[in-house]
Amino acid sequence: MTIIGLDDTDSRERGMCTTYLATRVGERVVAAGGDVERRLLVRLNPAVEHKTRGNAALALHVDLDPATAFDLAAAELEGLAEVDDDRTSPGLVVVPGPAEAVPEPVAAFAADAVTDFHDLDAAVDLLDRAGYRHRGWHGGRGRIGALAAVGAWAAFDEWTYERISYREFDRCGTPREVDERSVFTASEAHYPDAWDTVDRAEGEAVCVPNAPGPILHGIRGDDPDAVRAIAGAIESEPVERAATFRTNQGTDAHLRPGAVGDLRDGRAYRVDGVVASEPATRRGGHVFFDLRPAGSDAAERPSDDPVQPCVAFEPTKRFRDRVRHLRVGDRLTVCGEVARGTLKLEKFAVRDLVESERVVPDCPDCGRRMESAGRDQGYRCRDCGERRDRKAERPLDRELEAGWYEVPPCARRHVAKPLVRGGFDAPVHPER
Ligand SMILES: [Zn+2]
């Protein structure tokens, strides 16, 4: 087996797309008498998404020899990779297989590329030391992702599917003609084997991209037959070609364990903590709250306790209502990427809800609210003289339950795991 890794061939201007290129390379492999055993679509650290849209890298597992595979992929890149667009920096890496047995440093490089950052020197150094074939255009930064895609099959054990259907190339840039009703009907028939096809509450066909580019729709799921069936049932303009990818989308591969006070920008975490401020909606409709460390049991937060600001952005829509229902003292696990010191929520688990609040007591005789009897003197009723030493506990009506809440499909990041996929450590409240 030979592994072909490709990355950073997206052109924002002309709407090229790395998956399209990989599909074309796969066709060349078949035309040369080879076979494509597997196509991988690997989402790298989403914090570097501004570099390439979606920060995707691709790998093809083929049965040609490495030299032939390299020449054929390089020829396709030359022709299609938008190498004239110097904002892209394509890279090609070809490595002998099998993909499950690449050297450990290559697998480790892939794991780090999803949760962290690499520079080009590290990639080229690793490639040269291993004696792998590689080529870059416009600096060839894409070799970082290409090498990561090569190591991904060995680095990760959780994979989902995406069936990507492409437009006729000369239609790119025009509005996509897709019958949304057929999308909703097909999605309904195969949920939850396929997920994030639509957002029912928003009435949005999430599988149809808004950005320019050759993709007509991409159907994601755990079952390859289900994603193919949905793609086949959608009524639309002509589909020029289609391919099924194995992918780390929907797996939470980007998350790492973290602790409040110890989080860094550009990484994504799973963090335990206690809500430290009432959620507040700010300009633009974004909802913020602070989280303090999980360990602190004191009712009053120590002044030197760190806090971690968290936000549910406006595009997360109804998820913000879940966040607004949080109260100071609720125990949570939150997940998301940290940028400029703020954790951008993708999902959270309610571990323990505050079930009551302390209030000034009502008088048991006349029912009127008591008043403070003075500093440390408790409370008394002005009319009846009834006294109480302390505040009363009043039960709270909570809108939340224990378990996981998530952003809706319309706001899901590629790599974030939908709750409906299961495997979580608490009950789930999936959005669909
Ligand atoms: Zn009274």
Image (cartoon, rainbow, N blue to C red):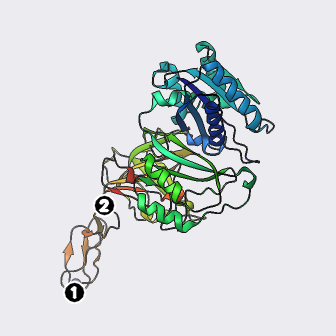
Residue 426 is situated, as x and y percent measured from the top left of the image, at 30, 51
Residue 196 is situated, as x and y percent measured from the top left of the image, at 48, 56
What distance separates the C-alpha of mark 2 from that of mark 1? 29 Å
The amino acid on which the numbered mark 2 sits, given as a three-letter code, is Val
In the rendered image, the vertical position of residue 271 relative to residue 427, given as above or below: above
Which of 10 and 105 lies nearest the eye of the viewer? 10
The amino acid on which the numbered mark 1 sits, given as a three-letter code, is Cys
| Residue 180 in view (yes/no) | yes
Residue 19 is situated, as x and y percent measured from the top left of the image, at 62, 41
Q: Residue at x 28, y 63 (%)?
A: 355
Q: Residues within 10 Å of mark 2 (few under 14, many from 20)?
A: some
Q: Can you identify the residue that label 2 sits on?
A: 354
| Image quarter where ligand 1 lies | bottom left
Beta carbon at label 1 within 8 Å of ligand 1: yes
Q: Which mark is residue 366?
A: 1
Quadrant assignment, res 91: top right
| Count of numbered circles in the view | 2
Q: Judging from the image, what secondary structure is the residue with disc 1 in?
A: loop
